[in-house]
Amino acid sequence: MPNLFIGLGPNGVRVTEDELKARIVEISPILAIRKRDMCAFVDVASTEDGEKIIEKLNNVVINEARLNVQWSKSDRDRQRGGPPGGGRDRERRRDDSRDRRRDDSRDRRRRDSRDRRRDDSRDRRRRDDSRDRKRARSPDSQGSR
């Protein structure tokens, strides 16, 4: 089933689903419409119906919202014979890079944690050393100064 994407821009919140549906149905019958704040998705019965809607409604203004009507991404890919870059593999590559970034940040946290523990132990040693020096001084040596 062919699917259209309608970009409504920032003024899209001023356009109701009923208004949009009424304008589209004047041109061609539709199967379904799903409107979000600044966009809508429309299911049409045929590619010809979709082409008519694109031709008649693209760049039309409704309630100060300029419509940008085009085939939805999934339908553009289907018309070209599949998504560019291999589709599923591209998704997998993106997931791999996200995992790599997550691993990098995890490694960074581990490194930071190790550095903090190392700094803490150095501080503890310094405190212990200064206490030892204070204890090493005898009361006689302090009085003769």
Image (cartoon, rainbow, N blue to C red):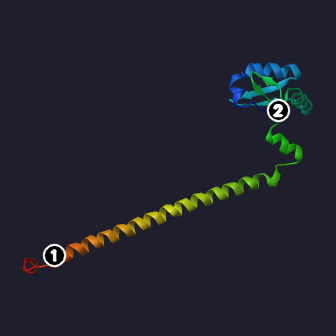
Tell me the amino acid under the disc marked 1: Arg
Assign the C terminus to one quadrant of the image. bottom left
Compared with 23, 111 (above or below) is below
Compared with 110, 140 (above or below) is below
Compared with 89, 25 (above or below) is above
Residue at image position (34%, 71%) is 122
Snapshot quadrant of residue 74: top right
Task: Give me the C-alpha separation between circle 2 and circle 1.
Answer: 83 Å
Query: Crowding near pointer 2: few (<14 within 10 Å), some, many (20+)?
Result: many
Residue 108 x/y as whole percent: 51, 63
Residue 5 x/y as whole percent: 79, 34
Q: Which residue is mark 1?
A: 135
Q: Which residue is mark 2?
A: 69
Of the two numbered discs 2 and 1 on the same chain, state the one appearing first in sequence.
2
- On the rendered structure, is 34 left or right of 140? right
Residue at image position (86%, 23%) is 29
Snapshot quadrant of residue 10: top right
Q: Nearer the viewer, mark 2 or mark 1?
A: 1
